[in-house]
Image (tube, rainbow, N blue to C red):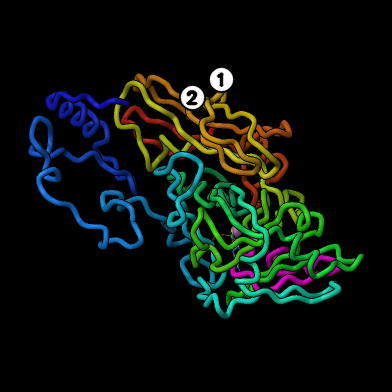
Amino acid sequence: MIEPTDPEKKRSSRRRFLAGAAGLAVAGATGAARADEKNLPPNVAGWSKQLGEGVASHPYGAPSKFEKDVVRRDVQWLTASRESSVSFTPLHELDGIITPNGLCFERHHSGIAEIDPNDYRLMIHGLVDKPLTFTLEDLKRLPRVNRIYFLECAANSGMEWRGAQLNGCQYTHGMVHCVQYTGVPLKLLLEQAGLKPNATWLMAEGGDAAAMNRSIPMAKALDDCLVAYRMNGEMLRPEQGYPVRLVVPGWEGNVWVKWLRRIKLGDQPWYTREETAKYTDLLENGKARKFTFEMDAKSVITSPSPQAPLKRKGFTVISGLAWSGRGKIKRVDVSLDGGRNWRTARIDGPVFDRACVRFYAEFDWNGAELLLQSRAIDETGYVQPSKAELRKIRGVNSIYHNNGIQTWALRASGEVENVEVG
Ligand SMILES: Nc1nc2c(c(=O)[nH]1)N[C@H]1C(S)=C(S)[C@@H](COP(=O)(O)O)O[C@H]1N2
Ligand SMILES: [Mo]
């Protein structure tokens, strides 16, 4: 929206916002501070009167210091130890579909392994004709592809099963990121090793202290998995698995093994800790679902949201993300009244298979209280369920795979709260 240029008007609209937002203690919200008159037209601003820093000051660039609040955050009581740590993507501060590398959420079972690329090796063994070991250079010499995919931790929104809990989409939905990977199709490596006819599963193992490992069915491994070493052009960040991670499109984040050191071929799953004690879904009847690999279609309004309150009445843009582990997002709907009426949101930017899409819905806010929701529909026809619909099937004992529709209550003050509608 275009800011009023008349300094008087500007001040008064700021005052309105400050009055409206008085008493707000929203973590991470960037408050509208008063402008310094000296820098405003018709004056010549301070930055126009002197030379700026030269290029040598930042061999690897960083965001503007004024964006210092745009950071990953964690929830202290959730998991604060190196044995189990998680940070969340600041979704409310981002736009488009690509997550900047430094803001991608992190989830580690034993901290960030620091691997010297010269000492890096990937072993492939088990039910193969010829066990192989690849160096990083070996992998980089092989034919590679570029693919944009979302990665969502199965535990994203996991704290919300029994009701609205965390106040901010960073915390309710921030265990998702979407980047472009560069890597070698896993199929190519497996073909080089030569699969025995009875090789129907593989086990991927990480080089971190947890040696985190998961079983993956061969059909998936041969279909679209990547052994990736770059994200958004640069080498993987240490926290995302430097130098090599597995990319398992559309499937729960846990199987995207980081610091990938070993792939073993077998004729059955391994039933590792991460696919038995963890990453299974306890149902209402006491039974547990296992191997729920695919991430169901999901969406969230990232702005306005609790950390991104509305600053003024009038024309405003609702913005959000949608994704599906089963293909492309076909449509996103937005409701302003808690799901009674829906309208189709505008998707802008590319729509890739199993990547995030960005949606917008413009409206004129008259200051009334609203219940904001979004729902995603993917190309299989699957419609993101309400939380009530989801609980009918799943009960409330689950942690993982909560893709229920999120409701944000927009208050008259512009403040936004995580709520549920009946
Ligand atoms: N080796 C290893 N791989 C791992 C993990 C781990 O702790 N160790 N965490 C997994 C989990 S639970 C998730 S959700 C994703 C998170 O990937 P990210 O940290 O790049 O966001 O990595 C997965 N791969
Ligand atoms: Mo995860």
Category of crowding for the residue at label 1, using alpha-carbon neighbours closer than 10 angstroms: few (below 14), some (14–19), many (at least 20): few
Decide if residue 290 is in sight here.
no
Residue drawn at (48%, 29%) of the image: 360
Residue drawn at (59%, 54%) of the image: 153
Label 2: element kind: loop
Front position in the image: 407 or 13: 13
Residue drawn at (89%, 68%) of the image: 196
Q: Are marks 1 and 2 in contact (CB under 8 Å)?
A: yes
Residue 303 image offset from top left, x and y in percent: 42, 36
Above or below, 53 against 195 in this view is: above
Residue 65 image offset from top left, x and y in percent: 26, 53
**Extreme residue in the right direction:** 197
Above or below, 7 against 85 in this view is: above
Category of crowding for the residue at label 2, using alpha-carbon neighbours closer than 10 angstroms: few (below 14), some (14–19), many (at least 20): many
Q: Quadrant of the C terminus?
A: top right
| 355 on left or right of 363 | right
Q: Amino acid at mark 2?
A: Leu
Label 1: element kind: loop
Front position in the image: 102 or 385: 102
Front position in the image: 107 or 240: 240
Q: Quadrant of the N terminus?
A: top left
Q: Earlier in the sequence, mark 1 or mark 2?
A: 2
Residue 416 image offset from top left, x and y in percent: 39, 36
- Magenta residues, start to end: 254-279
Q: Which mark is residue 212?
A: none
Above or below, 154 against 207 in this view is: above
Q: Which residue is mark 2?
A: 336
Residue drawn at (50%, 65%) of the image: 239
Q: Which mark is residue 341?
A: 1
Decide if residue 343 is in sight here.
yes
Q: Amino acid at mark 1?
A: Asn
Report the Cα–Cα distance between label 1 and label 2.
7 Å
